[in-house]
Amino acid sequence: MNIRPFRPEDAAALAQIFHAAVHGVSARDYSPEQCAAWSPQPAPAEAWQERTSDGRIVFVAVNGSDQPQGFIELERDGHIDCFYCHPNVAGTGVGLALYQQLEIRAQDLGLSSLFVEASEAAKRFFIRQGFTDEGRREIERRGVALHNYRMTKILI
Protein backbone atom coordinates (compact mmCIF):
# COMPACT_ATOMS: atom_id res chain seq x y z
CA MET A 1 0.00 0.00 0.00
CA ASN A 2 1.15 3.49 -0.88
CA ILE A 3 -0.23 6.94 -0.05
CA ARG A 4 -0.10 9.51 -2.82
CA PRO A 5 -1.85 12.73 -3.85
CA PHE A 6 -5.15 12.58 -5.71
CA ARG A 7 -5.01 12.37 -9.50
CA PRO A 8 -7.96 13.28 -11.74
CA GLU A 9 -8.17 9.69 -12.95
CA ASP A 10 -8.92 8.62 -9.33
CA ALA A 11 -12.29 10.39 -9.29
CA ALA A 12 -14.50 7.47 -10.36
CA ALA A 13 -12.77 5.10 -7.94
CA LEU A 14 -13.22 7.55 -5.05
CA ALA A 15 -16.93 7.83 -5.82
CA GLN A 16 -17.17 4.03 -5.71
CA ILE A 17 -15.17 3.82 -2.46
CA PHE A 18 -17.42 6.41 -0.81
CA HIS A 19 -20.58 4.55 -1.84
CA ALA A 20 -19.19 1.13 -0.85
CA ALA A 21 -18.01 2.43 2.53
CA VAL A 22 -21.38 3.99 3.35
CA HIS A 23 -23.20 0.77 2.47
CA GLY A 24 -20.54 -1.52 3.97
CA VAL A 25 -18.66 -0.02 6.91
CA SER A 26 -21.32 2.51 7.95
CA ALA A 27 -24.16 -0.01 7.60
CA ARG A 28 -23.03 -1.45 10.94
CA ASP A 29 -24.15 1.76 12.68
CA TYR A 30 -26.84 3.24 10.43
CA SER A 31 -30.07 1.82 9.03
CA PRO A 32 -30.49 0.86 5.35
CA GLU A 33 -32.73 3.93 4.94
CA GLN A 34 -30.04 6.19 6.41
CA CYS A 35 -27.32 4.68 4.21
CA ALA A 36 -29.50 5.09 1.12
CA ALA A 37 -30.08 8.76 1.98
CA TRP A 38 -26.36 9.28 2.63
CA SER A 39 -25.33 7.73 -0.70
CA PRO A 40 -28.18 6.60 -2.97
CA GLN A 41 -25.69 5.78 -5.75
CA PRO A 42 -22.08 6.54 -6.62
CA ALA A 43 -21.68 10.18 -7.62
CA PRO A 44 -20.42 11.02 -11.10
CA ALA A 45 -16.64 11.11 -11.38
CA GLU A 46 -16.84 14.76 -12.43
CA ALA A 47 -18.38 15.67 -9.07
CA TRP A 48 -15.48 14.07 -7.21
CA GLN A 49 -12.95 15.69 -9.49
CA GLU A 50 -14.57 19.09 -8.97
CA ARG A 51 -14.19 18.76 -5.17
CA THR A 52 -10.43 19.14 -5.52
CA SER A 53 -10.69 22.51 -7.27
CA ASP A 54 -11.27 24.39 -3.99
CA GLY A 55 -7.71 23.86 -2.74
CA ARG A 56 -8.36 20.88 -0.50
CA ILE A 57 -5.60 18.30 -0.22
CA VAL A 58 -6.66 14.76 -1.03
CA PHE A 59 -4.53 11.74 -0.18
CA VAL A 60 -5.29 8.41 -1.80
CA ALA A 61 -4.22 4.99 -0.55
CA VAL A 62 -3.46 2.69 -3.47
CA ASN A 63 -2.56 -0.97 -3.73
CA GLY A 64 0.40 -2.39 -5.67
CA SER A 65 -1.53 -1.95 -8.92
CA ASP A 66 -2.12 1.76 -8.13
CA GLN A 67 -5.83 1.11 -7.55
CA PRO A 68 -7.39 3.42 -4.93
CA GLN A 69 -8.42 1.70 -1.69
CA GLY A 70 -9.26 4.74 0.44
CA PHE A 71 -8.93 8.51 0.65
CA ILE A 72 -8.93 11.45 3.03
CA GLU A 73 -9.46 15.17 2.41
CA LEU A 74 -7.92 18.10 4.29
CA GLU A 75 -9.32 21.58 3.78
CA ARG A 76 -7.06 24.59 4.35
CA ASP A 77 -8.80 25.49 7.63
CA GLY A 78 -8.02 22.11 9.21
CA HIS A 79 -11.35 20.48 8.37
CA ILE A 80 -11.21 16.81 7.48
CA ASP A 81 -14.07 16.52 5.02
CA CYS A 82 -14.24 13.02 3.54
CA PHE A 83 -12.41 10.00 4.95
CA TYR A 84 -13.42 6.64 3.53
CA CYS A 85 -11.85 3.24 2.95
CA HIS A 86 -13.30 0.45 0.86
CA PRO A 87 -14.89 -2.18 3.13
CA ASN A 88 -12.38 -4.77 1.84
CA VAL A 89 -9.53 -2.85 3.51
CA ALA A 90 -11.33 -1.46 6.56
CA GLY A 91 -9.42 -2.33 9.71
CA THR A 92 -6.18 -3.18 7.87
CA GLY A 93 -4.25 0.02 8.62
CA VAL A 94 -5.10 1.83 5.38
CA GLY A 95 -7.14 4.46 7.23
CA LEU A 96 -4.41 4.98 9.80
CA ALA A 97 -1.80 5.48 7.08
CA LEU A 98 -4.05 8.03 5.35
CA TYR A 99 -4.71 9.89 8.58
CA GLN A 100 -1.02 9.97 9.53
CA GLN A 101 -0.14 11.49 6.15
CA LEU A 102 -2.87 14.09 6.61
CA GLU A 103 -1.66 15.05 10.09
CA ILE A 104 1.92 15.46 8.86
CA ARG A 105 0.69 17.76 6.07
CA ALA A 106 -1.49 19.73 8.51
CA GLN A 107 1.54 20.33 10.74
CA ASP A 108 3.64 21.31 7.70
CA LEU A 109 0.94 23.86 6.83
CA GLY A 110 1.16 25.28 10.35
CA LEU A 111 -2.38 24.31 11.30
CA SER A 112 -2.96 24.43 15.05
CA SER A 113 -5.91 22.03 15.03
CA LEU A 114 -8.02 19.63 13.01
CA PHE A 115 -11.77 19.16 13.09
CA VAL A 116 -14.23 16.71 11.60
CA GLU A 117 -17.89 15.71 11.61
CA ALA A 118 -17.47 11.99 12.18
CA SER A 119 -19.82 9.09 11.63
CA GLU A 120 -20.11 6.40 14.30
CA ALA A 121 -17.28 4.32 12.81
CA ALA A 122 -15.12 7.38 12.17
CA LYS A 123 -15.73 8.58 15.74
CA ARG A 124 -14.17 5.39 17.10
CA PHE A 125 -11.18 5.88 14.81
CA PHE A 126 -10.68 9.56 15.64
CA ILE A 127 -10.92 8.96 19.40
CA ARG A 128 -7.95 6.58 19.01
CA GLN A 129 -6.05 9.37 17.21
CA GLY A 130 -6.50 11.79 20.12
CA PHE A 131 -9.55 13.73 18.97
CA THR A 132 -12.04 15.10 21.47
CA ASP A 133 -15.75 14.44 21.00
CA GLU A 134 -17.54 17.79 21.18
CA GLY A 135 -21.01 16.35 20.83
CA ARG A 136 -23.52 14.60 18.66
CA ARG A 137 -25.08 16.54 15.80
CA GLU A 138 -28.40 15.73 14.19
CA ILE A 139 -28.41 16.23 10.43
CA GLU A 140 -30.73 15.43 7.54
CA ARG A 141 -29.96 13.97 4.12
CA ARG A 142 -32.68 13.64 1.51
CA GLY A 143 -35.33 13.93 4.20
CA VAL A 144 -33.82 11.24 6.44
CA ALA A 145 -32.45 11.95 9.92
CA LEU A 146 -28.79 11.03 10.46
CA HIS A 147 -26.24 11.95 13.08
CA ASN A 148 -22.53 12.55 13.38
CA TYR A 149 -20.10 13.94 15.94
CA ARG A 150 -18.16 17.18 15.94
CA MET A 151 -14.59 16.30 16.94
CA THR A 152 -11.37 18.29 17.26
CA LYS A 153 -7.68 17.71 17.84
CA ILE A 154 -5.11 20.30 18.89
CA LEU A 155 -1.84 19.86 16.96
CA ILE A 156 0.44 22.22 18.91
Image (spheres, rainbow, N blue to C red):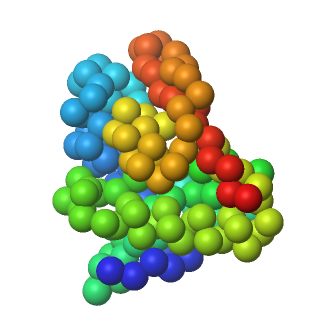
Looking at the image, residue 50 lies above or below residue 35: below
Identify the image quadrant of the C terminus. bottom right
Q: Is residue 51 left or right of residue 97?
A: right
Q: How many marks?
A: 0
Looking at the image, residue 64 lies above or below residue 140: below
Residue occupying image coordinates x 43% and y 20%: 146
Foreground of the two, 14 or 125: 125
Q: Where residue 10 appears, x then y in whole percent?
A: 46, 70
Quarter assignment of residue 14: bottom left
Q: Where residue 123 appears, x then y in whole percent?
A: 43, 38
Can residue 59 be spotted in the picture?
Answer: no
Foreground of the two, 106 or 20: 106
Foreground of the two, 41 or 151: 151
Quarter assignment of residue 86: bottom left
Q: Is residue 141 left or right of residue 121?
A: right
Residue sitting farthest toward the bottom: 64
Q: Where residue 135 appears, x then y in whole percent?
A: 55, 23
Residue occupying image coordinates x 23% and y 43%: 24
Residue occupying image coordinates x 49% and y 62%: 99
Quarter assignment of residue 93: bottom left
Q: Where residue 48 appears, x then y in whole percent?
A: 54, 55
Residue occupying image coordinates x 51% and y 49%: 130
Identify the image quadrant of the N terminus. bottom left
Foreground of the two, 30 or 51: 30
